[in-house]
Image (tube, rainbow, N blue to C red):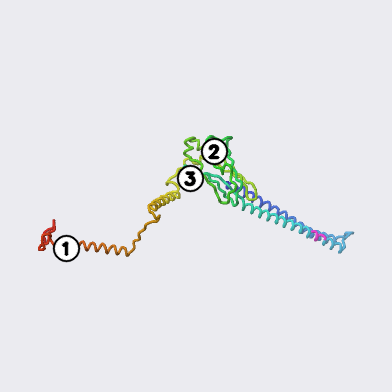
Amino acid sequence: MGDCVRPTYFYLRKSWKEMNKEKHTWIAITLGSILLSPLLFIGGIILGSNTDVSHALSSDSMSSWVSAAATLAIAILTFILAKETWNLRISQMQQVEQIRKDSIRPSVELYFLPSPVAFQFINVHVENNGRGVARSIKFTFRPEGKESFTPAELDVISHLENINMLKSGLSSLGSGKSRSSFVFSFLDLSKVHKDKMFEVHFSVSLSFEDADGIAYISESIIDFSEYIGVTEIGGGDPTYQLFQETKKIREILQRVQGNMSSGRFNVNLFTSEDRDKEREAIRKEIEEARKSEESRRAVPPGGAGQPEPVPNEPPRT
């Protein structure tokens, strides 16, 4: 839509420049004629005074005529200057008013997007891309290129009308704001209408007003043939996957916390001193075990003369 508007705007701007150029040319010609008129008048008087004319003008009457012509020229130039100044003032006021209207002009559109949960779930979005608040937003569904809706289109529209904001409209929607809602599952409707789902093609007319009550109308086209051949890889939306993994971690932590009577995590801190104590305790246990084994080998069960031989060990020499 934007590509269609831009050439028209360029043509209007070019035509306006040509009109201004032509207007300035006529103004220059008019001003030149007015300025040359007193000079031609004076030249004619001087030329006539050098000829033999019976009713020649006196010097007083000639100065009066020159003063009158100069006064007339100044009056005409003053009128033209005042008129151009007034036109410039009006043009500036119109530009300021147009800038103010553009600053509060809303732009509302409706479109479908797949849900982050799964590709077959379709969400409807109503978004205001304009600079001003949109008020009294109404939605009207119309067949596109035909006289009536097909059964598949009626089914889609019935799902849309189940959403109250599309059926009754929106009271207001701020600049840069949007509303969205789940509408239907594409696979569920495809089971009913088969390949006719890809032939769904209708328009949605959106009427709304700005803060000054000026009415606007925009149109959105719903065309399901755009989904032919569209596939998805990668397991869905990464943000939704991250949400699911975070949810699993939270559930695990809640179960761990639920097994504690106090509701707090029992955390044992292991410092460097604890590690030194543990190593010292292990060393003492090993030393005591070694001493016990040596004493056991040194004193046999039958007497104190000979050490008890160790089984499966060769005799010492």
Asked whether, in this view, residue 180 is left or right of residue 289, the answer is right
Q: Is residue 35 above or below residue 218?
A: below
Q: What SS does tag 2 mark?
A: helix
- For mark 2, does the 10 Å Cα neighbourhood hold few (<14), some (14 to 19), or many (20 or more) residues? few
User: x and y percent of residue 142 in the render?
Assistant: 58, 39
- Give yes or no for contact between labels 2 and 1 (Cβ–Cβ under 8 Å): no
Q: Label 3 sits on what residue type?
A: Ser
In the displayed structure, 268 sits above or below 155; it is below
Kindly state the secondary structure of the residue where label 3 is placed.
loop
Which percent across, then down, holds residue 241? 43, 49
Which circle's residue, 2 or 3, is located before the other in the chain?
3
Give the residues drawn in magenta, as a range. Answer: 68-72
- Tell me where residue 90 sits by quadrant: bottom right
Q: Is residue 196 left or right of residue 131?
A: left
- Residue pointed to by mark 3: 115
As drawn, 2 above or below 265? above
Q: Which residue is mark 2?
A: 158
Residue type, mark 1 in image:
Ser
Quadrant, the C terminus: bottom left
User: Observer-nearest residue: 232 or 61?
Assistant: 232
Query: Residue 232 location in percent, x, y?
Result: 44, 44
Mark seen at residue 24: none
Q: Secondary structure at mark 1?
A: helix
> Which residue is rendered at x = 50% and y = 35% of the image?
196
The answer to which of marks 1 and 3 sits earlier in the sequence is 3
Label 1: few (<14), some or many (≥20) within 10 Å? Answer: few
Q: Nearer the viewer, mark 2 or mark 1?
A: 1
Q: Earlier in the sequence, mark 2 or mark 1?
A: 2
On residue 295, the disc is: 1
